[in-house]
Image: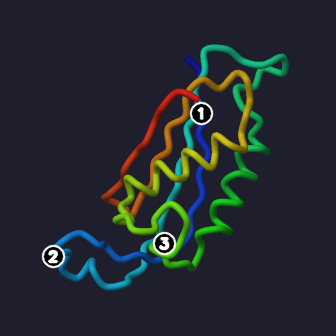
């Protein structure tokens, strides 16, 4: 199985909406890092698993979309707790809509909230 990983980072804000979130219930910023790991059993005719330019473009679009915004106000988060687990799933759905290489069979999206906390969503594509 081959894998190719690309990443980006940006600052965005959120606040948790669970009962009794403590200080996390107030709007605050995180320096998010988003890591995409594409996997597949074979390479394409050019010996690539995924077109890195397409993956980088998807990451740039993600960073532009979420940089300096309040996640709670963004589509996909309305009425939901804006956890990093939810964020990873939303990123997965956006990326699989834009990066469509036939050689990619799985995608893992890891969203780092800081240097010690991350969540991953991975599934077949």
Coloration mode:
rainbow
Secondary structure type for disc 1: strand
- Residue displayed at 39% across by 58% down: 84
Q: Quadrant of the N terminus?
A: top right
Q: Is residue 125 above or below residue 33?
A: above
Image-based side of 101 in relation to 26, left or right: right
Image-based side of 110 in relation to 5, left or right: left
> Where does residue 8 sit, x and y in percent of width and height?
60, 58
Q: Is residue 110 above or below residue 102?
A: below
Q: Earlier in the sequence, mark 2 or mark 1?
A: 2
Per the image, the residue denoted by label 3 is 71
Image-based side of 73 in relation to 96, left or right: left
> Where does residue 77 sit, x and y in percent of width and height?
46, 65
Determine the image quadrant of residue 6.
Answer: top right
- Residue displayed at 72% across by 44% down: 98
Q: Quadrant of the C terminus?
A: top right
Secondary structure type for disc 3: helix
Q: Earlier in the sequence, mark 3 or mark 1?
A: 1
Per the image, the residue denoted by label 1 is 38
Per the image, the residue denoted by label 2 is 20
């Amino acid at each position: 199985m081959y894998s190719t990983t690309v990443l980006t980072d940006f600052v965005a804000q959120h606040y948790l909406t669970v009962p009794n979130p403590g200080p996390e219930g107030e709007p605050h910023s995180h320096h998010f890092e988003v890591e995409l790991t594409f996997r597949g059993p074979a390479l394409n005719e050019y010996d690539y698993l995924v077109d890195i330019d397409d993956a980088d473009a998807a990451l740039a679009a993600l960073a532009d979309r979420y940089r300096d915004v309040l996640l709670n106000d963004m589509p996909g988060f309305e009425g939901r707790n804006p956890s990093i687990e939810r964020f990873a799933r939303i990123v997965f759905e956006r990326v699989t809509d834009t990066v469509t290489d036939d050689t990619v069979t799985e995608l893992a999206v890891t969203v780092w909230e800081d240097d010690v906390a991350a969540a991953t969503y991975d599934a077949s594509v």
